[in-house]
Image (tube, rainbow, N blue to C red):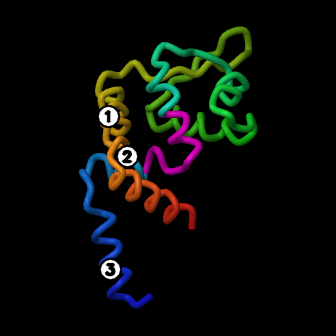
Amino acid sequence: MTANNDDFTTRLMDDMDPILLDFVKKKVNSFIKWDLVRFFYENPHTADTVENIAKYAGRNTDAVRPELEDLVESGIMQKKILDNTAIYSLSTDETMRALVDKFILACEDRHFRVKAVYHIIRGMR
């Protein structure tokens, strides 16, 4: 691929709402995080352990744990310690919840999903 094609592809894929582009590049920058955000969007009152969350998401606990921690650090999730056990839940911050809602609703559009997948894969390099 030539530099002009790379530039065109980048411009095409960057043609997203800048807030959602930043959200994908910096917060939901892996497919596991995307699955977790979707799970908590669909189950907004869930508060559970990493083991149970991994089971519900159909993922390996060891793969989910660091992704949940990243989501906590980015403000999407919150973590509480109860009897020496970490319990994760969706942030109660209204601004963050609105951003999660916006992302999930945007995911209904196939073109948006293609662009989000592109950015996740590109970020994995």
Q: Which residue is disc 3 drawn over? A: 7
Q: What range is drawn magenta here? A: 26-37
> From the viewer's perspective, is the residue at label 3 or at label 2 nearer?
3
- Neighbor class of circle 2 (other Cα within 10 Å; few <14, some 14-19, many 20+) is some
Quarter that holds the C terminus: bottom right
**Residue 30 is inside the magenta segment:** yes
Q: Residue 104's spot in the image, x, y percent?
A: 38, 36
Residue under label 2: 23
Label of residue 26 in the image: none
Q: Which residue is mark 1?
A: 99
Which amino acid type corresponds to the residue marked 1 in the rendered image?
A: Leu
Other residues around mark 3 within 10 Å, as few (<14) / some (14–19) / many (≥20): few
Q: Are marks 1 and 2 in contact (CB under 8 Å)?
A: yes
How far separated are the C-alphas under marks 1 and 2? 8 Å
- In the depicted view, which residue is nearer to us: 109 or 30? 109
In this rendering, would 102 be left or right of 49? left
Element type at mark 1: helix
Give yes or no for residue 61 being in the magenta stretch: no
In the displayed image of the protein, which residue is found farthest to the bottom? 2
